Amino acid sequence: MLRAMRIVTAATCVLTASSSFGQTPAKSPVQWKVDFTGLYEYDTNPLRFSRGSGDSHWRLFPSVDVQAPLNARTTLFARSSARRDQYAVTSLLNGIGVNGSVGLARRVSPRLSVWGAYNLSRSEQPDVLEGSSLRFASYTQQGGSAGLVWRTRSADVVRADGFAMRRRYLGLTSPLLPASSSQTDPLLGLGGSWTHTFAGEAGTWSRFALNTTWHRSNNPAYSYRLPSVSGAWGTNVRSGTTLRLDAVLAWLQYDARRVGLSSVLRRDTITELGTTVAWHPGRRVEPFVRVSQQWDRSTDPVRNFSDTRVLVGARINVWSGGQPVARDGKRLRSDLTDDTPLNGVSRLGPGDRRYDALAKIDLSYAHIKAGRWAQAADAARAASVLDPASATAWANLGVALYKLGDVPGARQALERSLMLNPKNDALRSVLARMPRKQ
């Protein structure tokens, strides 16, 4: 027993002194991926335009995502995507759209990250309801977004972000606008969320969010406020299967849109509950199914409805690079956290699992230097969930578990680190001297 403790103590000294682990990560390689998502959705009452008859539609959604670290703390990110919607009945919703964003993200401390981006999008839809104020038309939208991510503890993340956009319609007319003018809509949004990762439960997390959007317009009928509150919970049901439950409550409040010829303003209360099951996250093909139920209660009787939506699809990783590969040839990645945008702004930089993993590694190293071994283990474990391909995350976890007396757990973590980085001869030597049992 004494001999084993001496080996553990010596190995711990080697680990904490080594330049290969127990430290902040070096500059990561450029990472990129090209995804193609296809989905089929059936909606019992899409946007009420089908008069309650129900409709189905296909959506094709290719996207390109690039993250280029400029140094160990600053990342340049860019994303571009396109979509094609084809409805069976509600033809006015058919159309194509493209959007892109580019920005910088900076980890200013182990607990705090900030980011900013420029966003540009364009939507094309046919001009069908030509004489109506509800007529759809193409538009271009551009503006900026920014935010911060603060890790209050190793298991808790607070995120705040916002955006300011300007949307300009092409060809949209309305009885409330002069014949020669076009509609221009400024948009402003603010949001915040709190995410908690449950210790001891692999891949289990919860999120609570508050968001508000202000939509102004030179067409009074299009000015509104949209505050909302939402919650989500996700977990690994079993290996290769994830489950997510979510709920949203929103209030749509128009400034000048009346109900018919009355003086009553339109006010909607929108509630939605949903369940999503995904298989094989991180694999080349990721099928998913989502079932949701939505209720809309409005001061406009025509807008009172409830509908059920069933969505089936798959995301295909067409091409990716810059990420470590395990021995079985599969790219290691985790989709346990939520990538859904806040306020319609894409989550890149802070809030993206790969970027957040680096901050967790920084935090684990800060705890290691201070001798806070339990906190170091929590932060390193969270990093390994966000990025299972990070050899540094697993090595930091091994160091912390050593100090906590969990020799078998430390060996398992360090062996995983060595598998991801077989060239680490110092770690291989330490493992060779480690006892198999405590």
Image (cartoon, grey):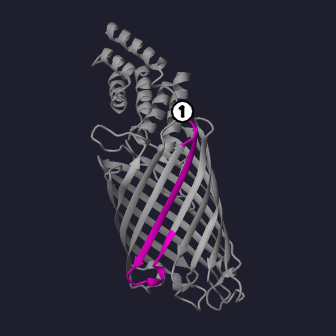
Is residue 347 at all visible to an observer of this figure?
A: no
Residue 178: image x %, image y %? 72, 88
Please tell me which residue lies in front, 312 or 329.
Answer: 329
Which quadrant is home to the C terminus? Answer: top left
- The percent coordinates of residue 337 (x first, y second) are 45, 49
Give the prevailing secondary structure in the magenta stretch.
strand
Residue at 42 percent across and 55 percent down: it is 34
Residue carrying label 1: 363
* Residue 392 x, y percent position in the rendering: 44, 31
Q: Is residue 41 magenta?
A: no
Residue 10 against residue 68 in the figure, above or below: above
Is 37 located above or below residue 137 in the figure? Answer: above
Residue occupying the point 44% across, 33% down: 393
Q: Local crowd at mark 1 within 10 Å, few (<14), some, or many (≥20)?
A: many
User: Considering the numbered disc 1 on the image, is that residue within a helix, a strand or a loop?
Assistant: helix
User: Residue 423: where, in percent of width, then height?
Assistant: 36, 26
Q: Is residue 416 left or right of residue 375?
A: left
Residue at image location 46% in from the left, 19% down from the top: 18
- Which residue is more in the foreground, 265 or 388? 388
Q: How many labels does the image show?
A: 1
Quadrant for the N terminus in the image:
top left
Query: Which residue: 51% across, 56% down?
Result: 79
Residue 222, quarter of the rendered image:
bottom right
Q: Which amino acid does label 1 sit on?
A: Leu
On the image, which quarter does residue 309 sit in? bottom left
Which span is picked out in magenta? 69-97
Residue pushed farthest top? 2
Residue 86 falls within the magenta-colored stretch: yes
